[in-house]
Amino acid sequence: MRTEDLLAAIATGLWRWDNASGRVTLDAEAARLLGLPPAPVELSEAAARSRFHPVDFAEINGVVQLAVAEETLAEARLRIVDERGRVQRIVRSRSRPRVVDGGFELVGTLQEVPEPQPGTSAAHTPITGDWRRSREAFLLDAGRALAEARSTAEVLRVAAGLSMPGFMPDGLAVFGIEGDRLSVIGHHGPHGDEERPSAGTALADDHPAAEVVRTGRALYLPTPEEYSRRYPTAWPVAAPFRRTSWAFVPLVNAGRTIGAWMAAFTQPVAFTPDERSVLTTVARMLAQALARAGMQEEQQELALGLQRSMMPTVQPDIPGMTVAARYVPTGGGLEVGGDWYDMIPLPSGRLALVIGDVQGHDVRAAGLMGQLRIALRAYASEGHHPDAVLSRASRFLAGINTTELGGHGEDQRFATCLYIEVDPATGLLDIARAGHPDPAILLDDGTVLVRPTAGGLPLGIVPDADYPTTRLVLEPGETMMVCTDGLIETGGHDLDTGWARLRDTIEAHEPGEIDESLERLADALVQAVHGPPSHHTTGPLVDRREDDIAVLLLRRDGAGCGIGTGALPARPVRRTVLTVAQAEPERIAEARRQVRAVLHDWADPDQVDSAVLMVSEVVTNVLLHTDGDALLVAEISGERGARRVRVDVADSSDELPHRRSPGELASSGRGLVLLELLAGAWGVDPRGDGKSTWFELYEDAGEAAGPLSPESEPAA
């Protein structure tokens, strides 16, 4: 009997589809199955296409490509339709694809198939356009979910939660490669850890996952008999889980097999081309997600290692003081940058707090930061004063730029820095600043003031730059905060709006709470910038990129408000001190800002404006009519609602101010007139080394100004 007659007896036809020439050849039985006269015929591709459901015929290309890639049979179930598009029968096509110039060639069989039987995967996956649309939607959702996973654990959770259309594995395992052995990266099943696959399988072992890794080809085991026959050694391990079908698919990324994915099924699965296509597509997405997550975890581990090596732990047991610090790398790449902080014991018994920011957010910035930090430690340990430490550090960084770049080039780097020498016994702070943001002080009553300090150029710009020193006193119960500009400006903020955001965060913590946990305040500051609240306080510079963050908090303990007590003086005093030098008249504006900050919660805004105006007049008079600097001290005392603010401006001149009667067009001479009109009380006090011009305002509008004492009466 001829082969054609034998196939016809079992209702099986032969067909050949030459995609390159666009011709389809059918024998008599194949022609009958397609609804044509039962005789051999050659059709155009368009004529043959008209006999199949259009959705099914469109799927042929995908099935063939999959078969070509896996070097397996191309198998598909296709609906045959009549001239009106009505389905006449369903046939199964089994063919061997062969790549030819300009396309492919299929040679195989067509056989009519009965309706799917209950209890099989095919029964739940009818060939309809709706099912295929469901499959496409599933793959889109799976791809999106896997792309958003940021760690290996997240990738495995996503893979375990995938609900495949029509067939759902109830056991999953992901195998990786460690040398010449397989490792279990993750697994999922109804029995938890009891279902963990055997670890330590050698790549040379008779195991389906090992074979998939060795060959790079998928394995489909539709029955337990097939599994036990092909892999008798591995079968005893798989048998107790009572599964009926298994798929082992290679995980391939960038052309390299990085592992294998096992999907096990309780219900029988025939692994049709559609099902294999879904499994293969998911495996490709899973491999990419695992590779991406692994790379991110390696980068994060490297970044954390660099961070741990470059960021010291702060000394927790400073007598009379508490310190907290945070470093948050938010740049790209390895998530390391040029921000740093340090705490350095000094030969004098004091300690130095250092915070700085090397320009850039890359490995070079991190490397320069490490070198600069070591240099600063060396100069400080030699006992140099703050100004000398920064001058030497600037020369050091300028030398690196010259040595590595020949003194020119786009990759020259500079660094901002704030160096503070702290005397824990007295709270004395000697501060040198190189282009860095000023420190902020949280006063004992909860008010935050930015303390202006003298400063010089960033390190590395001028080798022999000078860095003047500013002396402040951290009073008992006060907290100093120093930070890099990332804490201030991240989220589109400038210096003004950024400080306002931080002030709100700090002042939201009661002083007693800060006593109990300075660490909690450090967390709150970072949360305000990077947590959900930051999305509601974006600044005016919406396109500003995020920056690294370093922050240091230093609190001086006090007898009345020590850590854990939460006790405060009955009448807390709020004070700010500022020197305006003859050579720095621009600091008059800073004096106005300081007074306004001290009075930020004053009841009467008009009195605040008056205080700012009087400060401007008095300080300007010192700079115009004396040869010395002006020392401003503003102090608030009393209970809220009945407080007093007193402002003293001292200078080194013994000459007392005189009242003048300026004309309408005069540009000066109104200082004392303004004091008489606006102040609740005012006067001029002679001192041994000069004088002090002062004024007071009272929050209680009904409080009368007291008479001036004879020694305070200004000269006529």
Image (tube, grey):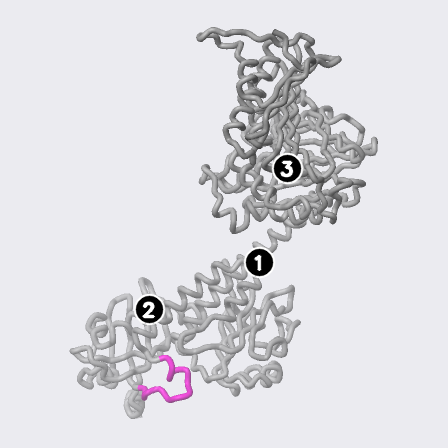
Disc 3 versus disc 1: nearer the observer = 3
Disc 3 vs disc 2: Cβ atoms closer than 8 Å? no
Q: Residue 689, relative to residue 382: is it above or below?
A: above
Real-space Cα distance between discs 3 and 2?
A: 84 Å
Residue under numbered circle 1: 294
Q: Nearer the viewer, residue 579 or 611?
A: 611
Res 531 seen here: yes
Quadrant (top left, top right, bottom left, bottom right) of the N terminus: bottom left
Looking at the rendering, the stretch of residues picked out in magenta corresponds to 113-125
Residue 498 lies, in percent from the top left, at 53, 38
Q: Amino acid at mark 1?
A: Gly
In the visual, does 78 lie left or right of 316? left
Which residue is found at the position 65% from the left and 37% from the top? Answer: 442
Instruction: First in sequence, mark 3 or 2: give its number.
Output: 2
**Where residue 471 is drawn, which disc sits there?**
none
Q: Is residue 81 magenta?
A: no
